[in-house]
């Protein structure tokens, strides 16, 4: 399921863009998780890796162009659509591989066209895979098939639908390569939210019956992400 982030400090425009996103999703019969942020710092702090980012440029603190630059440095591969009242940044948008640059006020036709491009690039990206190397052997694992990732004694274990694979590395480095479907639920675990079946206390069950932990600090955010996903999938 797509994750879409709206970064806009003006409440009116944020609400308007949210409405456009929902109309687009309904028109295309698609489901997505939508999150709104009032500043670039807020988006950076939560550590998300959204599939699509709808970014204003003139924001409190760091401007939108700087925020996207920071996200790119952290490994975010999300598709970016800048939505702004200023033309002067248009050429800088190419430097961060933006999909589109829309001037306010935003027309539905223009917005839908930009979203089409972003979704198409995201779908192409959905076949992204990790290439793990161990003892000279390369293993390709599609991200959609990953259940969770675990670190123990500086060893990374990637649990997929078709087995477990391990290599030497850090969970932080791996996290930067993963899509917005993944959530760092514990200092030792990253889980693919698409494969979460249930949570009982601090234990989460994933597809295939595997169990991992959610830290107390991440519990509230995990539940929010899970609830949002269930709503998008029509589960009550």
Image (tube, rainbow, N blue to C red):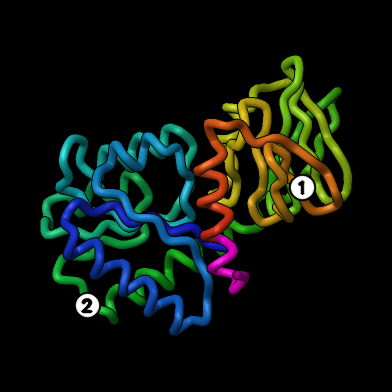
What residue is at 81 percent from the left and 39 percent from the top? 139
Kindly indicate the quadrant of the structure image that contains residue 175: top right
Nearer to us in this view, 61 or 215 = 215
Task: Give the answer, above or below, for where 125 lies relative to 204.
Answer: below
Task: Give the answer, above or below, for where 188 lies relative to 9.
Answer: above
Residue 214: x and y in percent read 64, 36
Q: Which residues are magenta?
A: 229-236
Crowding around mark 2 (Cα neighbors within 10 Å: few <14, some 14 to 19, many 20+) is: few
Residue 148 as seen in the image, left or right of residue 73:
right
| Circle 2 residue | 107
Residue 232 part of the magenta segment: yes
> Which numbered mark, 2 or 1, is in the foreground of this view?
1
Q: Earlier in the sequence, mark 2 or mark 1?
A: 2
Residue 147: x and y in percent read 75, 47
Residue 129: x and y in percent read 69, 47
Nearer to us in this view, 129 or 225 = 225
* SS at mark 2 in the image: loop
């Amino acid at each position: 399921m797509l994750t879409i982030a709206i970064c806009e400090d003006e409440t009116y425009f944020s609400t308007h863009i949210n409405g456009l996103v929902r109309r687009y999703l309904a028109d295309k019969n698609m489901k997505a998780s939508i999150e709104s942020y009032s500043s670039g710092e807020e988006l950076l702090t939560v550590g998300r890796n959204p599939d699509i980012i709808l970014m204003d440029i003139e924001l409190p603190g760091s401007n939108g162009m700087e925020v996207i630059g920071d996200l790119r440095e952290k490994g975010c591969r999300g598709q970016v659509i800048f939505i702004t009242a200023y033309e002067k940044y248009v050429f800088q948008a190419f430097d961060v591989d933006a999909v589109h640059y829309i001037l306010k006020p935003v027309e539905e036709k223009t917005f839908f066209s930009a979203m089409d491009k972003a979704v198409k690039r995201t779908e192409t990206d959905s076949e992204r895979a990790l290439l793990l190397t161990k003892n000279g052997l390369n293993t390709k694992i599609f991200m959609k098939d990953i259940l969770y990732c675990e670190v123990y004694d500086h060893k990374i274990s990637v649990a997929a639908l078709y087995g477990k694979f391990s290599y030497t590395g850090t969970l932080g480095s791996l996290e930067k390569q993963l899509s917005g479907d993944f959530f760092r639920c514990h200092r030792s675990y990253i889980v693919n939210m698409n494969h979460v079946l249930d949570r009982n206390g601090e234990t989460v069950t994933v597809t295939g019956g595997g169990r991992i932990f959610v830290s107390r600090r991440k519990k509230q955010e995990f539940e929010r992400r899970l609830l949002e996903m269930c709503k998008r999938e029509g589960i009550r």
